Amino acid sequence: MGGDEKLEACNEVVEEENEQKGGFFDFFWAPIYWFKMLANETHWSFVFGVLTVYGVNQGLGRAFNRVGTDYYMKDVQKVQPSESQIYQGIISIPWLVKPLWGLVTDLLPIFGYRRRPYLIFAGRLHLSLHLNNEAISGLLGTFSVLLLSFHENLHIVFALLSMTAGSTGAAIADVTIDACVVQNSNIRPSLAADMQSLCALSSSIGALMGFSLSGIFVHLLGPKGVFGLLSIPYGLLFLVGMLLDEPFMPNFSYKKVNQKLLDASKAMWRTLKFPDVWRPCVYMFLSLALSIDIHEGLFYWYTDSKDGPSFSQENVGFIFSIGSIGSLLGALLYQNVLKNHPFRNLLFWTQLLFGLSGMLDLMLVLRLNLKCGIPDYFFVVIDESVSHMINRIKWMPLLVISSKLCPPGIEGTFFALLMSIDNVGVLLSQWGGGVILHLLNVTRTRFDNLWLAILIRNILRITPLCLLFLIPRGDPNASVLPADILGGKEEAETPENENIELVSLVSSVDGK
């Protein structure tokens, strides 16, 4: 049965099951049927891998890491907000080299497998030949956070190196699961938005749980204790690493690697030269770079006992968790209401609302909310939920566009390249925010000009509206790549490019 026929049959089953329910049960069972549809069409193990990497590691783990790092920089290293903002950018540098890892996993199989271990200590574990990229990231992440947790008076340089190592592990896991998502998106373009929604929902739910608990654990264990707990989600990557399977590639000719590298480079360059490809890339980069990040300045103000609202650690974690609820609502709203709207129209309104939502921060810092009789805590909750919901809706169509821009055969590498371009934009926004905080003399104890930094940020958020002509107007469910590139798709779907699936620990589970 062909891919389209299988998808139609799967949708018919879901529709029949939906017809058997009504009212409240429709709302309750719809997500279950949606998961079932994705599992039937892409294999249950793909869904499990996304939930593990995006939900547990990137959602839960990143939430703990964010709150722990904020307090670690503020209370342990005692750095200024502008310095902390710059350091956050340094920690994210491994995400800029994701194409290198994607290129290796796409073109250079080891022992017949394209995504098997490259950095695992040879002969260290008897399971080493059964661990892949997620396992490597588990090793890197677990070691780095344990070093931060147990080492007393760690110098800022070594702390940054350790955090960067953990970020490297997360980037390795991300590029591997992204390759799976992109391959499935190319094979089933009609499900591209659903798969991005699955990633976003998993990440948002994991972040919600993580932020809800992070403040409590920072209060009980301190920021270094939270880093110790991070070894658990990093360690869970071993589970995905042990289960992740891919078609075995016997008789691979390593003499052809150079030629394959040359062909892949030509394919990427040929793809990037198409206006329908490079124009959205330019928009995504500039929209991220221009939206400068001043999170550290706001965080220091949140916790300041003199000028700020002096939120406790538990309150900060809960506030961030509300932001995750906003992100979750944004993902649900996009999936159920907005995913079929033209990209350009949707991005116009979300970018405009994103800039306007920043005015809530301005009202908070100027204490206008108190003049209106609205308590700080309640106002911040509204601010976080609204801004994160809009930001998620703004980001979702950009992810869908990115997944549709990847040529067959080098999906992982090209998607990693696109995400690296975006990450360069994020890095510039973080460093730009740090420079603005420094120039305006926003310090650990002085926040007189924080309002001006917020105003500058809000104005810059609206400027990408002038660049919307770079985004295609077409049907969001249609392919973006030119026909001559997609023409080689069938040839690319050889056994070595089939869907990556996770091997069941119990035989014939999915056959029952």
Image (cartoon, rainbow, N blue to C red):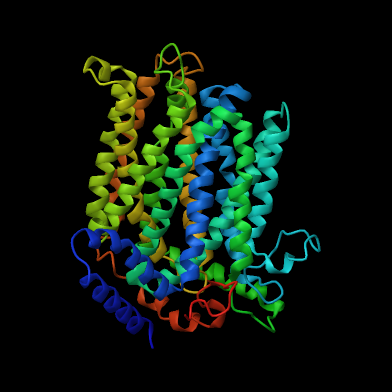
Residue 157 located left or right of residue 5 = right
Please state if 34 lies on the left or on the right of 132 as rendered.
Answer: left
Picture coordinates of residue 385, whole percent (x, y): 32, 38
Q: Residue furthest bottom?
A: 1
Compared to 303, does 94 lie above or below?
below
User: Quick one: quadrant of the N terminus?
Assistant: bottom left
The residue at 39%/62% (across/down) is 277
Quadrant in the rendering for residue 89: top right
Residue sitting nearer the eye, 352 or 70: 70
Depicted 135 relative to depicted 63: above or below: below
Q: Quadrant of residue 113?
A: bottom right
Question: In front here: 273 or 65?
Answer: 65
Q: Is residue 123 left or right of residue 495?
A: right
Residue 127, can we see it? yes
Left or right of residue 100, residue 475 in this image: left
Residue 414 makes an appearance in the image: no
**Residue sitting at the far top:** 306
* Residue at position x 39%, y 50% in the image: 284
Q: Position of residue 368 (x, y in %)?
A: 26, 18
Residue depicted at x 35% and y 21%: 452
Query: Residue 403: x and y, percent?
Result: 41, 63
Could you tell me which residue is drawn at 46 percent across and 38 percent down?
211
Residue 266, x across and y down, in percent: 53, 70
- Residue found at the very far right of the displayed protein: 123
Query: Can you say whether 47 is above or below 148 in the image?
Result: below
